[in-house]
Image (cartoon, rainbow, N blue to C red):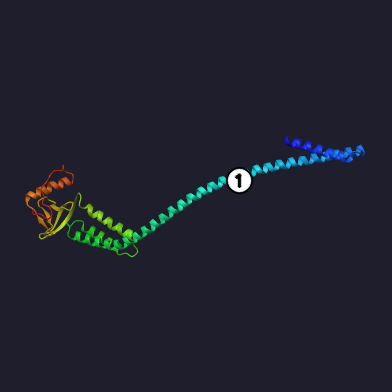
Amino acid sequence: MKQKLFFMVAVTSLVFCVLATTSSADPEPFRERVEAGVAETVTVGKKSAGLRQRWQAEERLLADEAHALELELKLLEARSRKLQGYSQQRQEEILRLKSGLEDMAEIGIRLEPYLDDLAVKIKEINDNDLPFSLVERERRLADLNDALNGYDVDLAEKLRRLMEVLKIEAGFGRGFEVSEEVLNKDTGETAVRVLRLGRIGLYYLTLDGAKAGWFNRELKVWEELSGGYSEAIKEALRMALKQRAFDLVCLPVAGGKP
């Protein structure tokens, strides 16, 4: 509406100007000049309207772009704050890892000689233990010492190997085991069936069942037991071999007297 009013005022002003300057002139040229002026004014008005519309479109486009940039800026600011938090967390984690590495280095310095001491103690325990699975246990200890003295074996592997030996040795303290062996006694070699009750005691019974005995830990020798213990060992062997139900039996124990 404002554009139309502006256009009418402009046309009216132009007509008055032309009338004022050419009132005494020939009416025909005057009409042509008026029409030309009106046409020019109309053209200018159309151009002005087109420019105004284009400016308004560009203004809306710029406003949309500015809004989008504002949103992107807020997003980037939020991500920047999070990245700063992540960076701080990573720095703290790096410091913890560095501290852990320093602690591990110190542990390694103390652990390696400790592992060597444990291997020596295991050897001493085995030397004073009941004589069972000697070949297997000696071989296992020899392999452990090779690993502990190996320059190409890292500390973690040394620890694993020693813990494995400790676990196996600790397992010997539980349960029971029956095996057939040949004992070297003063009377010569004797084939026997040996019963191991954990680390409590070792007992034997000859294959014909005529004689029985035990390993005297104090004297470190195999000794023959009296007939009463012989029957108890027979019953214990039957229970270990699952030939009868478990029951109480009376046997001498390591460190005791038959």
Of the residues shown, which amino acid type is indicated by label 1? Ala
- Mark 1 secondary-structure assignment: helix
Residue 96 position within the rendered picture, expressed as x and y whole percent measured from the top left? 38, 56
Label 1: few (<14), some or many (≥20) within 10 Å? few
Residue 82 location, x and y as percent? 48, 49
Q: Position of residue 92 (x, y in %)?
A: 41, 55
- In this view, 195 is above or below 45: below
Instruction: Please name whichever residue, 72 or 256, is drawn nearer the observer in this view of the structure.
Output: 72
Question: Relative to residue 178, is residue 5 drawn left or right?
Answer: right
Residue that extends furthest to the front in the rendered view of this protein: 20
Left or right of residue 74, residue 92 in this image: left
* Residue located beneath label 1 in the image: 66
Is 33 placed left or right of 123 in the picture? right
Residue at screen point 32% across, 58% down:
157
Find the residue positioned furthest to the right.
26
Work out whether residue 85 or residue 52 is closer to the camera in this orientation and state it: 52
Tell me what residue is drawn at x 45 percent, y 51 percent: 85
Q: Quadrant of the N terminus?
A: top right
